[in-house]
Amino acid sequence: MTMPSECDHSTRDEDDHDSMPQLPSIRPPPHSHNSKQGVYFILEKASLVAAFVGKKYQILNPDEHANFLRRKNMNPYDFRPDIVHEALLQIMSSRLCLSGRLRAVFIRTDEVELLQKFSIKSKGGHGKLLKLIQNPVTNHLPINSLKIGLSFSSTKAVQLRDYVSGANCDENLVFVVGAMAHGKIDVDYIEDLISVSGYPLSAGTCLRRICIALERSWNIQ
């Protein structure tokens, strides 16, 4: 989920901290890989902060935990797990995902329930919905990949369909989108930073536009 910084494991000793996996990733349903281009998504700065509220360990959100957060002198609207939820809905429900061209989704965050359990299984116990992997994220991307950041502040304005159509067909595309309520992504692994609108867009809207552009460019019906 977010991540210029490493995840915080202050409750562990130093040796465990160094060896712990730190980056959650979501793999789409199994499919047969081929030589076609694939796409990866990285959701940076995701707001997934977990805490004990009463007797329950919960991911904090402004609707349910506003009073709790204010007592801690925290701004409730800095805690927005709904942004990640909407982003994942846009990705996982796309024809891009259903066609097998989605390779993985990485979510960079400071704290999350995943850091306690290392993985989250489906309710039926037939597979893992999420698992933790070791930072940095670039170790889990193919060598032949173009890492693209999206930011309203970028001076490079593009039409998404033209942009993805012009990409090298031998490269996998990695789109880095901010999953926070405000601010911008600030990571050093991005190779190109683009703007896709004259207005600030939500993460979900950005991802929907990316999926549609790729579906059209790759002729996914």
Image: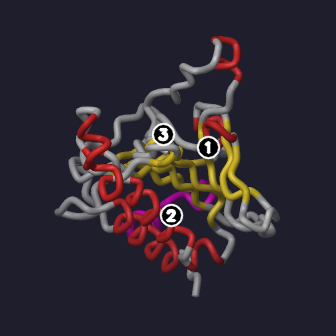
Residue on which the image places disc 1: 114
Q: Nearer the viewer, residue 84 or 141?
A: 84
Q: Could you tell me how far apart the alpha carbons at marks 3 and 2 are, in whole angstroms?
A: 25 Å
Q: Earlier in the sequence, mark 3 or mark 2?
A: 3
Q: Nearer the viewer, residue 53 or 91?
A: 53
Whole-percent x and y of residue 3? 46, 36
Instruction: Residue lying at the far bottom in this picture: please name it.
Output: 221
The residue located at (30%, 53%) in the rendering is: 62
- Under mark 2, the amino acid is Leu
Residue on which the image places disc 3: 52
Question: Mark 3, residues whose alpha carbon is within 10 Å: few (<14), some, or many (≥20)?
Answer: few
Q: Examine the image and state in which quarter residue 173 appears.
A: bottom right
Q: Examine the image and state in which quarter residue 19 appears.
A: top right
- Under mark 1, the amino acid is Leu
- The reply to whether the magenta stretch includes residue 163 is yes
Number of the front mark, 2 or 1 = 1
Considering the numbered disc 3 on the image, is that residue within a helix, a strand or a loop?
strand
Q: Is residue 183 shown above or below 26?
A: above
Q: What residue span does the magenta drawing correspond to?
A: 160-172
Residue on which the image places disc 2: 88
